């Protein structure tokens, strides 16, 4: 029984890691189409994480596409150096 639980847990952890990588890729795509050049992508991703805190402060909740757009718009105002 424990072995089966451990196997299921490992499988779930693997799936979570894969989803996290896909989400990171999707963020990169969103920033690319927002105008971030390839060479500035690592800085833009860090700036995005900081901007999330700035835009939503201590709010909890889901991040839908509208919230992602707000964060990127905030970045364009506060970090124009990251965009073309």
Image: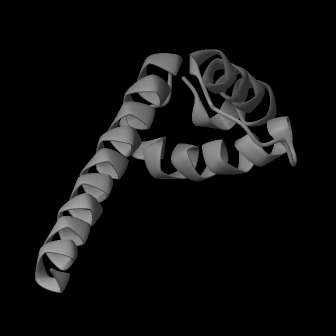
22 or 41: nearer the eye? 22
Answer left or right for 21 relative to 70: left
The type of colouring in the image is: one colour
Name the quarter where the N terminus is drawn. bottom left
Answer left or right for 55 relative to 44: right
Name the quarter where the C terminus is drawn. top right
The image shows residue 70 at horizontal and vertical percentages of 72, 21
Residue drawn 19% across the image and 66% down it = 8
The image shows residue 35 at horizontal and vertical percentages of 50, 21
Q: Please tell me in which quadrant of the rendered image residue 56 appears.
A: top right
Give above or below for 13 relative to 44. Answer: below
The image shows residue 48 at horizontal and vertical percentages of 63, 42
Q: Please tell me in which quadrant of the rendered image residue 3 appears.
A: bottom left
Give above or below for 57 relative to 16. Answer: above
64 or 13: nearer the eye? 13
Residue drawn 24% across the image and 51% down it = 18
Q: Which residue lies furthest to the bottom in this view?
A: 2
20 or 6: nearer the eye? 6
Residue drawn 32% across the image and 55% down it = 16
């Amino acid at each position: 029984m424990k072995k089966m639980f451990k196997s299921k847990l490992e499988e779930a952890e693997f799936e979570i890691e894969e989803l996290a990588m896909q989400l990171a890729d999707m963020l990169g795509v969103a920033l690319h189409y927002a105008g971030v050049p390839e060479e500035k992508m690592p800085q833009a991703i860090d700036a995005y994480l900081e901007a999330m805190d700035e835009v939503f402060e201590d709010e909890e909740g889901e991040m839908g596409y509208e919230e992602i757009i707000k964060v990127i718009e905030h970045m364009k105002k506060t970090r124009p150096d990251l965009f073309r």
